[in-house]
């Protein structure tokens, strides 16, 4: 696929958000996390597209929708490589890499069944101890979790 | 909110450890004082532990404080479904310090977030038990005169034994060489070996509880090898007696060697060791009283005359 055509595909959105560079295996989880199935706007989802960076990537295009930072942060846990393009009047007005916050609050379930967060009506809290491999450490029981072992709330 | 609490030994700096040890030594000289006169200390044992509770409550009583609380959660509203948060806020309204033990990991940390009253963690599941570590440190400090330039040998269950992990972390502030003695199934976990490697802490690993290991030790820290820790019961049968200590094995040990054990012991230390002056586990438990007195004063910001 030529660069021109790629840009054209993005530009075809008048206003909205394009989330690019999502690892294919995380794509549908990302769709879930962003609450996309509940939107009534037009949504285009591409899966198993070629990517020099990821091998195989997914892309989500949503018209007339802009996500709050805390919503976008949700996908940083499963797709730290994702890029958020904000489109206004056919122009990419911002292009941002999602960023893992240093602390992940109320998003992830601790895998330790004896953790206080699993037994009290409270928010979970994890410290990000390794950004590259997305390793989180529970602020309460100190159990560590990474990659595919991360369970979202 | 959590600044005065003692939830984990890892939150205590080297300076604070040394300060606590000095205070503990002071209390050993002067165990009965009225420093907690007028103070109310809550002991909340969501999981029963008679040994730890009696030690803390004796510490409070000898300093003239009053105790409220419970030793059996069945008698409280927790058993009626009250959240930990509500219980802690309620007790925090009455008490000056909350000493708590809980079966869930991270419970003390969470408690420290929901009240301004200082929390002392008296054990949260398999997670942390900082007063045990403080009494271990005090016992080593007292018998060796220092926490530096020592060889500390840990024996038995190094995989699940939280006391050895916490002690290792606390001693990492000091110049200590470790010997880890365990079977393959109960070996010191990788995370702690990596921690040692990264921080330049010397250690050696041994499958055999040999004379060489014993004779080079200043401290022998014994732990119980429990049957339920094994996935392979044949392996348990094979190793269960390999890490037991008998008096004859101490014949050529260093004169300053002391034997520690977090108690209760079963047969990993033979009764014939008890009369050896190097056996220190009963005094070790008694040292818990002074270490706990020091911890209570620390969270209340009370400085004692030294
Ligand atoms: Zn946890």
Image (spheres, grey):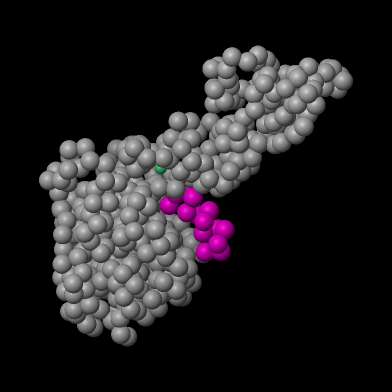
Question: At x 70% / y 36%, what residue is drawn?
Answer: A97
> Is B208 or B146 nearer to us in this picture?
B146
- The reply to whether residue A83 is visible in this rendering is yes
The span shown in magenta is B188-201
- Give residue A70's position: percent from left, percent from top: 57, 36
- Give residue A29's position: percent from left, percent from top: 56, 23
Quadrant for residue B22, please give it. bottom left
Name of the residue lying farthest toward the bottom: B306
Question: At x 30% / y 85%, what residue is drawn?
Answer: B305
Name of the residue lying farthest toward the front: A89
- Give residue B153's position: percent from left, percent from top: 39, 64
Is B206 situated left or right of B36 in this image? right
> Is A72 or B185 nearer to us in this picture?
A72
Asked whether B190 falls inside the magenta stretch, the response is: yes
Asked if residue B111 is positioned above or below residue B170 in the image, the reply reads above
- Give residue B193's position: percent from left, percent from top: 50, 54
Is B129 situated left or right of A80 in this image? left
Asked if residue B88 is positioned above or below residue A110 in the image, the reply reads below
Asked whether B86 falls inside the magenta stretch, the response is: no
> Is B64 or B140 nearer to us in this picture?
B64
- The reply to whether residue B160 is visible in this rendering is no
Question: At x 78% / y 29%, what residue is drawn?
Answer: A92
Instruction: Assign the N terminus of chain A to one quadrant of the image.
Output: top right
Question: At x 21% / y 59%, what residue is drawn?
Answer: B94
Quadrant for residue B30, please give it. bottom left
Asked if residue B8 is positioned above or below residue B218 in the image, the reply reads above
């Amino acid at each position: 696929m030529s660069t021109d055509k790629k840009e054209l595909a993005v530009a075809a959105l008048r206003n909205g958000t394009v989330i690019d560079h999502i690892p294919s295996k995380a794509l549908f989880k990302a769709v879930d996390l962003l609450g996309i199935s509940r939107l009534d706007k037009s949504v285009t989802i591409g899966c198993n597209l070629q990517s020099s960076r990821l091998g195989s990537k997914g892309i989500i295009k949503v018209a007339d929708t802009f996500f709050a930072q805390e919503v976008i942060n949700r996908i940083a846990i499963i797709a730290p490589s994702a890029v958020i393009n904000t489109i206004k009047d056919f122009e990419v007005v911002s292009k941002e890499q999602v960023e893992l916050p240093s602390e992940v609050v109320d998003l992830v379930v601790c895998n330790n069944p004896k953790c206080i967060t699993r037994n009290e009506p409270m928010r979970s809290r994890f410290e990000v101890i390794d950004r590259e491999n997305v390793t989180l450490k529970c602020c309460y029981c100190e159990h560590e979790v990474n990659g595919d072992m991360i369970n979202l709330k | 909110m959590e600044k005065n609490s003692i939830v984990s030994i890892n939150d205590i700096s080297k300076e604070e450890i040394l300060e606590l040890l000095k205070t503990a030594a002071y209390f050993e000289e002067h165990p009965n004082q009225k420093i907690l006169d007028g103070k109310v200390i809550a002991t909340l044992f969501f999981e029963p532990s008679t040994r730890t509770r009696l030690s803390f409550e004796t510490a409070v009583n000898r300093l003239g404080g009053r105790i409220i609380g419970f030793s059996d959660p069945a008698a409280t509203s927790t058993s009626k479904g009250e959240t930990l948060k509500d219980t802690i806020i309620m007790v925090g309204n009455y008490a000056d310090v909350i000493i708590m033990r809980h079966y869930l990991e991270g419970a003390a940390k969470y408690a420290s977030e929901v009240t301004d009253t200082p929390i002392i963690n008296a054990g949260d599941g398999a997670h942390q038990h900082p007063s045990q570590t403080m009494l271990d440190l005090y016992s080593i400090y007292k018998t060796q005169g220092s926490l530096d330039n020592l060889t500390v040998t840990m024996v038995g269950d190094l995989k699940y034994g939280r006391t050895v992990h916490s002690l290792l972390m606390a001693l990492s502030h000091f110049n200590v060489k470790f010997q880890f003695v365990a079977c393959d199934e109960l070996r010191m976990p990788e995370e702690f070996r990596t921690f040692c490697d990264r921080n330049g802490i010397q250690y050696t690993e041994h499958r055999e509880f040999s004379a060489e290991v014993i004779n080079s030790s200043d401290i022998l820290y014994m732990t119980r090898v429990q049957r339920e820790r094994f996935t392979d019961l044949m392996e348990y049968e094979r190793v269960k007696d390999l890490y037991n200590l008998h008096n004859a094995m101490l014949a050529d040990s260093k004169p300053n060697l002391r034997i520690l054990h977090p108690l209760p012991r079963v047969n990993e230390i033979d009764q014939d060791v008890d009369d050896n002056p190097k056996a220190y586990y009963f005094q070790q438990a008694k040292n818990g009283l002074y270490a706990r007195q020091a911890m209570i004063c620390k969270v209340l910001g009370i400085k004692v005359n030294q």
